[in-house]
Image (cartoon, rainbow, N blue to C red):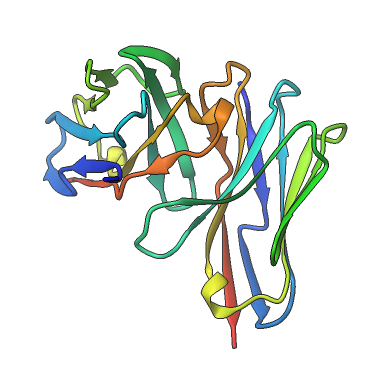
């Protein structure tokens, strides 16, 4: 069974630009969660989608948004990029949602650098 | 919302020693507490988890304990080996049960 796939793996943007990251979950998984990972801050929860509905959102500004498609693939978008948005963005899929029924399966992440 | 505090942030032990990482959580409604291990350059992976109706769970050299009254849980690794060197994250489910809130991580270094 294929794992969680994230694209692109690496990208460089400049301040003010916007970026879209993609995540393909494990086949059969309907929940997709997104996390921002930075040194010293650990894994910060962005949002969770289940069957195309955002069920939960972390404490991030409105510049961070996401969506989920009918095939469970998910995208997240960051508009008006700031230097502080430089991070590894991790996507994780699960059958029902990590908070409830068990294991999150993480992708390798998309490393965003904002110059 | 849920807040998870994790200590220590770094931990260095000699091979064969034990390592203990501690976490506290704020939301008494949390009922699921997993631990993830992230090796350098790799993705986080689940190593052990515990639910609120269980006080302790063990899997070979690793164990997790949970004290719901005090709202804290701990990871215990015995007979540490160099391959245990990694960043360990604790997490707690949020009240809605749809998100895992992670601690900031503990970098464990095991020297031989």
Q: Looking at the picture, does residue B18 appear above or below residue A15?
A: below
Q: Which of the two residues, A17 or B1, is positioned nearer the viewer here?
A: B1
> Which residue is found at the position 61% from the left and 29% from the top?
B93
* B8 to the left or right of A97: right
Q: Residue furthest right?
A: B69
From the image, which quarter does the N terminus of chain B lie in? top right
Q: Looking at the picture, does residue A53 appear above or below residue A89?
A: above
* A52 to the left or right of B14: left
> Which residue is found at the position 39% from the left and 36% from the top?
A35
> Which residue is found at the position 66% from the left and 75% from the top?
B80
* A114 to the left or right of A26: left
* B104 to the left or right of B18: left
From the image, which quarter does the C terminus of chain B lie in? bottom right
| Residue B6, percent from left and from top | 65, 48
Image quadrant of residue A55? top left
Image quadrant of residue A76? top left
Q: Looking at the picture, does residue B88 appear above or below residue A114?
A: below
| Residue A44, percent from left and from top | 46, 36
Q: Residue furthest bottom?
A: B112
| Residue B27, percent from left and from top | 71, 24
Q: Which of the two residues, A92 or B58, is positioned nearer the viewer here?
A: B58
| Residue A92, percent from left and from top | 38, 37
């Amino acid at each position: 069974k294929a794992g969680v796939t994230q694209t692109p793996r690496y990208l460089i943007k400049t301040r003010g630009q916007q970026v879209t990251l993609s995540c393909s979950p494990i086949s059969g998984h309907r929940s997709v969660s997104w996390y921002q990972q930075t040194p010293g801050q650990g894994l910060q929860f962005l949002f969770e989608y289940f069957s195309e509905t955002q069920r939960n959102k972390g404490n991030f500004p409105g510049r961070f948004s996401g969506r989920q498609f009918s095939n469970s693939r998910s995208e997240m978008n960051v508009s008006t990029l700031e230097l502080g948005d430089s991070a590894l963005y991790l996507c994780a899929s699960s059958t029902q949602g990590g908070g409830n029924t068990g294991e999150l399966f993480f992708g390798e992440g998309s490393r965003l650098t904002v110059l | 919302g849920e807040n998870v505090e994790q200590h220590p942030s770094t931990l260095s032990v000699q091979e064969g020693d034990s390592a203990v990482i501690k976490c506290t959580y704020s939301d008494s409604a949390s009922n699921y507490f997993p631990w993830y291990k992230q090796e350098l350059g790799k993705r986080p992976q689940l190593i052990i988890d515990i639910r609120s109706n269980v006080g302790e769970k063990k899997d070979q050299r690793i164990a997790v304990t949970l004290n719901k009254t005090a709202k804290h849980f701990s990871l215990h690794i015995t007979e540490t080996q160099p391959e245990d060197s990694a960043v360990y994250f604790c997490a707690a489910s949020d009240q809605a049960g749809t998100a895992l809130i992670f601690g900031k991580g503990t970098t464990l270094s095991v020297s031989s």
